[in-house]
Amino acid sequence: MVVERKFIEDLIIKYRISKYLENSLSRAGFSRVEIQKTPVITRITTYVTNPGRVIGRGGETIDALTEDMKRKFNIDNPQISVAEVRNQRLEPRLVARYIANSLERGMNARRLLHSMIKEIMSNGALGAEIVATGKLAAKGARGKMIKARLGYLPKAGDVTKLIDEAKVASYPKYGAIGIQVRIIQPGTVFPDRKVKKPRMTNVAPVEQASSS
């Protein structure tokens, strides 16, 4: 029970740190965070689209961020490093945020999801799924769900831990929309099967729309 409690506590702290960094580094294009604890330090690696905004002039921004995290989360000797996102179309949080912003600008949800799922796959993903749920039509319309999916994406078992996932909310004028993006990165190895990148000419997005 002690080990399980510690595991849960670590997950909660990671979630809180991730939400804190998402809010603090939104202008830097925050995507995700990796945390590694050692007996001496806690390594915190943040992935962003603009590392310069995190580091700041002479490192003053990252120094302030380090002190703030030490105080907020009681972390002894945190060591923050910044990594630049290599491909934004393979980062679930960045994809979800782009979709959220596009919906708030009035773009058609169905076309947007189908376009983005193809972009994700064309950048090398082995599988991807985008789900949008909520007020996807004009004011007064009932809630719907639209799903676009391509490639291999397991739904159950330990292999689901190999899927990168993010959820964000969009707030267009006609109501809130929840957006979930799941991506299997290029080169991911599954213990039970060999997955090849699907040919875009042989696959098509699947769409589901249902009243809520």
Image: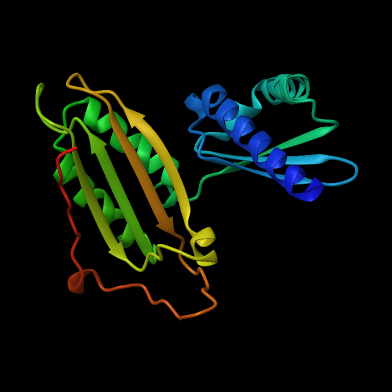
Pick the front one: 119 or 140:
140
Residue 42, given in percent of the width and then of the height, sits at 79, 40
Residue 60, given in percent of the width and then of the height, sits at 71, 20
Left/right placement of residue 6 relative to residue 93 reads right
What residue occupies the far right of the structure in this picture? 40
Pick the front one: 190 or 158:
158
Left/right placement of residue 41 relative to residue 196 reads right
Residue at 77% x, 21% y: name it.
Answer: 67
Pick the front one: 115 or 109:
109
What residue occupies the far front of the structure in this picture? 1
**Where is residue 203, by image quadrant?**
bottom left
**Where is residue 69, by image quadrant?**
top right
Left/right placement of residue 210 relative to residue 81 reads left
Residue 68, given in percent of the width and then of the height, sits at 72, 19
**Where is residue 198, by image quadrant?**
bottom left
Quadrant of the snapshot with the C terminus: top left
Residue 199, given in percent of the width and then of the height, sits at 26, 73
